[in-house]
Image (spheres, rainbow, N blue to C red):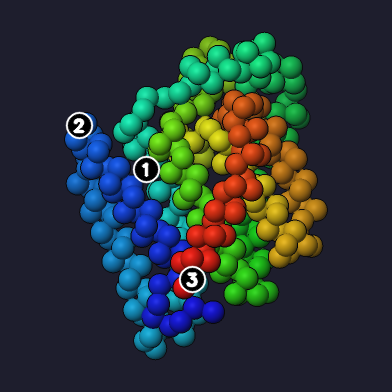
Amino acid sequence: MQKQGSLFPVDKALIIYILITSIIMVFGAINGQEKITIHFLARIVVILFIYTLAYLDKKPVGSNTLYKIIRNFYPLALLPSIYKETGYLNNTFFDYFDPFFVDLEFQLWHTQPSLMFSELFPQQWFSELMHLGYFSFYFLIFGLIISLYQKDKAKGIRVIALIMISFLLYYLIFIIFPVEGPLFYFSPEELNMNGHGIFYKLVHLAQDIGETQTAAFPSSHVGMSLIVLYLSYKYARQLFPIILVLCLLLWPATVYIKAHYLVDVIGGFISAPIILAAAAWTEKKLST
């Protein structure tokens, strides 16, 4: 249980992430990175917001239901902008590693799975099934969190912290080790994107709004969904079968819709337990 007026572990994790990426941004400025000022101002605003929420815990508003929802869920609301910023920072140290991954794909599979998968299964129903699986990523996370928060707020808050810290760890990897992914690396002619189903449109709308040239390796969609699957088994066993089915659709979908190379998926499976263990360790340390 958190003390009133204190920073939560997820608050501290966010502040640490902001400080680390601010240092990275300084290196970017030295190398000619533009629009640094607006990013630093945004960081100041977020840190002030976090401390303001912690301060209000001790005030009468701290018992307000709406305030508590904002206090506990605000980190998730920051995720889209934090993710988007990885595309701004991810060429600070290295250029994209996609040529290496494309060559590795060919060496391993003698083809490019991200291009061939949809050619092997061009049927509209299969395309929609894959796009449904990919789009379900958002429901996996929020479905688990909301379900837990309603039944046991303490568990819900801890799961928010674990998921948020896991995302931040993946984002640091994406910044330091930039990989665009097939969707950005290959030409439109090679991608041969076509479809007209509702989930196809929803996925590509989401990509148009929030996608950036980053986050391919390891696949956070695979890694985070595996983490959510484990957390559902541990904390919300009744949701586990549903989440498992959606994960079984989501994992191949990441390659089918050309968001990831096949080696990204393997990287997602390998990284998930490591990231979760690191997140759990970090959450424990920041709780003291």
Residue at left 71%, top 44%? 247
Mark 1 lies on residue: 85
User: Considering only order in the chain, which callout, 3 or 1, is on the residue closer to the N terminus?
Assistant: 1
Quarter residue 46 falls in? bottom left
The mark closer to the camera, 1 or 3, is: 3
What residue is at 40 percent from the left and 77 percent from the top? 6
Residue 128, visible in the rendered structure: no
Judge whether 26 appears above or below 153 on screen: above
Q: Amino acid at mark 1?
A: Glu
Q: Residues within 10 Å of mark 2 (few under 14, many from 20)?
A: few
Q: Residues within 10 Å of mark 3 (few under 14, many from 20)?
A: some
The one nearer the camera, 71 or 154, is 154
Q: Nearer the viewer, residue 236 or 108?
A: 108
Q: Earlier in the sequence, mark 1 or mark 2?
A: 2
Measuring from the top left, give residue 156's x and y in whole percent: 60, 68
Which residue is labeled 2 in the image?
32
Q: Which SS class for mark 3?
A: loop
Q: Secondary structure at mark 1?
A: helix
Say which residue label 3 marks: 287
Q: CA distance from mark 1 to mark 3?
A: 27 Å
Q: Are marks 1 and 2 in contact (CB under 8 Å)?
A: no
